[in-house]
Amino acid sequence: MLVAIAAGATARAQNNWLQAGQDPGATKYSTLDQINTGNVDQLQRAWTFNTGDKSGFFESTPLVVDGVMYLSAQNGVFALDPLTGAQQWKFETSGATRRGLAYWRGDAKTAGRILVSSDTKLLALDTKTGKLTQEFGPGGFVDMGVTMASPPSVHKDVLITPGGTPVIRAWNARTGAPLWTFNLIAQPGDPNNKTWEHDSWKTIGGTNTWGYLSIDEERGIVYIPVSIAGGDYVGVERPGDNLYGTSLVAVDIATGKRRWHQQLVHHDIWDFDLGAAPTLFDAVKDGKRIPAVAQITKMGMLFMFDRVTGAPLFGIEERSVPPSTVPGEKTSPTQPFTIKPPPLARISLKKSELPTTISPEHTAYCAALWDKYKLQDSVPYTPWQLNQDIVMFPGAIGGGNWNGVSYNKKLGLIITNVMNAGQWGHLEEVKPGEGRGGRGGRAGGPGGDDADSPRSPYRKVTPEGGRFWEPNRRYPCNEPPWGELIAVSTNTGDIAWRVPLGEFEELEKKGIKTGTASLGGGITTAGDLVFIAATIDGYFRAFDARNGKELWKTKLDVPAHAIPATFMGRDGKQYVVITAGGGGFLRSPTSDAVVAFRLP
């Protein structure tokens, strides 16, 4: 009887798309295989739904729960018929979580709920009516006092919320009552408090979580990707390694206590905060199965750890990196580098490596940019300098970013998209009475202090926008590939295959395959497929997960900087759905479309 119940629950989970990452471990993997390598080229559009809001940052992954699709947009929460796209209800609100929502299944006494944040409030909506459930909080919501860019994570009857302050909080899923908090700035009594020299822990912000969380349901552990501490490019006011900034932290859900952590950037002054959901998988090494977790980073490195102990799966090496020349800045002498796999994205650039193969005009533009600003060869973790422009690779949008990786359980592959593009600029001193300027959103994050802390004596300056590319055509000033889709073996750490992701039509016609910048991620299926949009060329694509061969693509109205979902409809057909909102940090045109595809 128990076996039958478990099998039914598994089938339900796979026919639906119950969480942004498909499952608590953010594998983004579906066992559905009706759409497969043999027929994906026949995929056609089933329907399109428009939310009515084209303000940008529409990055939501729809959920599909027992015959209803739920999604969040800037102007509200929608319930749709997943077979037709017809609206069933809408909850009017502004500032809803831009990357999606969460579902709590309920129990014998309490109906299931949709959880979504709106500004600083965490709302609980009835799945059938879209109305606030009055049993949750004072009237269907709790005021968290902070905004969230990503939805909460759910474990049994516990909701765990990220947010813009340096704490992770847990709530009772039925009542909204607070359960515990975990401080992401190491406090007195924590041995890691010493990584905040001169008591800087008292005054520094940041060190928050704007990305997705992941959960090991069997062990009751939540995995937290933490952002940079304080200002993005200046750390003079926070000497030390600044734990748990730019770290992967494992916390016991029952107690709210830390199990382990791994800091992936010491004293981060590059805006390399972690935004991607950690992805849970099992690796086989020396005949032994190891429960593991993978974290893709803006640095283009894919870190893999034993998810119980935190031990690196394939080793990490502390390598020497350049010191800062900025007065008062105390950088770490070393940084962690993955041994296997090697960095998946470009991490340095010399003048001799400027592009020469695209066109004479592009070659001339990049060379002139380098000479005009007296740029210097870039090595990993080059610190920003005072009154001297530097190039850093990757730039602060990656490498990898918030979209994370997918894990194909059938093939034993982690699959991810990365960018090979840089960023450049310098620091200048803030004189008494001057403002700092340069404010904006984090590169991939929720918006906030993009340059430096209010207490910092320096500010960031990025001439010509700071992207190391030819702005009109968005051609990076390095040789291609500029964007890639890469598969890594979970058992060996070796790269299984890599292919360019995205295209510039005018270059493709000349036979030049470059790839493009991308934000948004992919999913993978038992049909041996990878579905991914993300690229600035506006295509939605399917690849053979076994070898990276492109099998299908279709043009969307605007780029889809989001993660797709797939589900089995009540008509017996498998669907794939993507939100195409454009906008964002890659400066794409905006839209408000949700588009679904199926076989004829």
Image (cartoon, grey):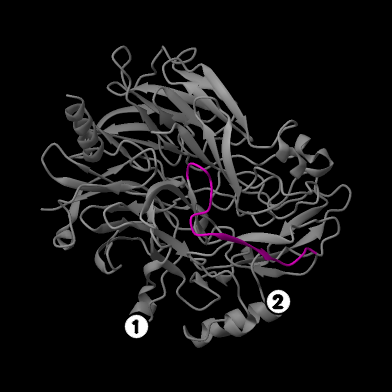
Q: Does the magenta segment cover residue 208?
A: no
Q: Which residue is mark 2?
A: 376
Mark 2 surroundings within 10 Å by alpha-carbon count, few (fewer than 14), some (14 through 19), many (20 or more) = some
Dot 1 corresponds to which residue?
511
At 74% from the left and 46% from the top, the residue drawn is 453
Q: Nearer the viewer, residue 11 or 531?
A: 11
Mark 2 element type: loop
Point out residue 170 in the picture as x, y percentages from the top left corner: 52, 25
**Residue occupying the point 58% across, 34% down:** 258
Label 1, label 2: how many angstroms apart (C-alpha)?
32 Å
Q: Position of residue 63 (x, y in %)?
A: 31, 37
For badge 1, the amino acid type reads Gly
Q: Is residue 533 visible?
A: no
Categorize mark 1 by other alpha carbons within 10 Å: few (<14), some (14-19), many (20+). few
Q: Which of the marked residues, 1 or 2, is nearer the chain's N terminus?
A: 2
**Residue 188 to residue 426: above or below:** above
* Residues shaded magenta: 307-324
Residue ID at (76%, 38%): 201
Q: Which quadrant of the figure has residue 375? A: bottom right
Q: Quadrant of the N terminus?
A: top left
Q: Is residue 433 visible?
A: yes
Residue furthest right as drawn = 432
Compare residues 242 and 123 and report the one nearer the observer: 242
Query: SS at mark 1?
Result: loop
Residue type of the residue flagged with mark 2:
Gln
